[in-house]
Amino acid sequence: MRIDVDLASDTVTRPTADMRRFMCEAEVGDEQKFEDPTVNLLCEMVAELLGKEAAVFLPSGTMCNEIALRVHARPGEEVIAHHTAHPINSETGGPAALAGVNVRAIDGPCGQFDAAAVEAAVRPSSRYAPRTRLLWVEQTSNHGGGSVWSLARLEAVTAVARRHGLATHMDGARLMNAVVARGVSARDYAAFFDSAWIDFTKGLGAPVGAALAGSRAFIEEAWRCKQQMGGAMRQAGIIAAGGVYALRHHVKRLAEDHANARRLAEGLAGLPGVKLDPSSIETNIVFFELTGALTAPVAVERLLARGVRMGASGARRIRAVTHLDVDAVGIERALAVARGVFTS
């Protein structure tokens, strides 16, 4: 089936022609021996970007998350995270299977929680209860509609964590979207956290990879987990080059994705049976609810039959994500198709 406009996720992006050439020409070596100059360069760039001592290149953001869990927490300990967090919903039970940790899910609007929620979730010292060990934040919040955590809120929730002796971790899968949307540096966002990572395969448009950053001691332990979990590579500079290129050329252009998401939201909001507040769109993720007889799975199927792909997130909720492979013309094409689906 032909897909003219793919809004299923920003993970569907393909490397640009210039990125492909840059990757093909990358200088390589054995990354396990720290002899791959391109991997080394990318790790240096990410450590500097996030204000950390060191970084490690990994095949995926999921591996970043799972390694962070293993380094920060011991089996039987507990992590506090929003109930929409990626490790809870999209990592196949990895926290339990790979780290042996408990996850205490807490609530809050737009995929975010406040300091009071963290305070209430920290377990009192007891030999009967798991020990609370780690606070988890996702910037931006995927299932919160791409919402951006403010510096003030990050400072508040991590202050509670520090007061209770917890480690802190930031899932920065779409951190650069927050950077562009708010004009706040990645270093400033990451300053509140012991560890943080960024993904190169979403809005940044690289084909593979993410990088996890923290103290030198943290990264040394992360490397042990990387080796054990099969994430160590050899001449990985070919794929790391995609991340280098993305950081150099694809960050500022994320503003285009945000503008396209707002235009998409404005167009969808006027359709019958669609509930959506365009002013709630902060970055590149658009969620909308269906209020009529049409269900999300059926609507998504009809959109796809007309060449536009979105994703059903339940019976009544649909998710659309803008990215570098969808321009303003593509957004108008998607809206034209949506008008046909939601008004028929």
Image (cartoon, rainbow, N blue to C red):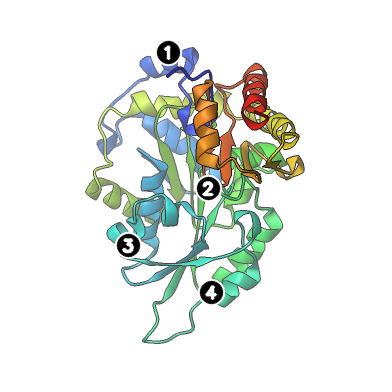
**2 vs 1, front mark:** 2
Q: State the mark number for residue 96.
A: 3
Work out how far the residue at label 2 is from the one at label 3, CA to CA, in angstroms. 28 Å
- Where on the picture, by quarter, is residue 217? bottom left
Mark nearer the N terminus (2 vs 1): 1
Mark closer to the observer (4, 1): 4
Disc 3 from disc 1: Cα separation: 41 Å
Mark 2 Cα within 10 Å, few/some/many (few <14, many 20+)? few
Residue drawn at x 42%, y 13% as measured from the top left: 21
Residue contact between numbered discs 4 and 2, judged by CB atoms under 8 Å: no
Q: Which of marks 3 and 4 is nearer the N terminus?
A: 3
Locate residue 237: give its quadrant: top left
Q: How far apart are marks 4 and 1 (CA)?
A: 49 Å
Q: Locate the N terminus and report the quarter of the image it occupies.
A: top left
Query: How many residues crowd around disc 4 within 10 Å: few (fewer than 14), some, or many (20 or more)?
Result: some
Mark 2, mark 3: which one is toward the viewer? 2
On the question of residue 15 being in view, the answer is yes
**Which residue position is annotated with label 1?**
21
Q: Can you identify the residue that label 2 sits on?
A: 315
Q: Which of marks 4 and 1 is nearer the N terminus?
A: 1
For label 2, the SS is loop
Q: The residue under label 1 is which amino acid type?
A: Arg
Residue 204 visible, this angle: no
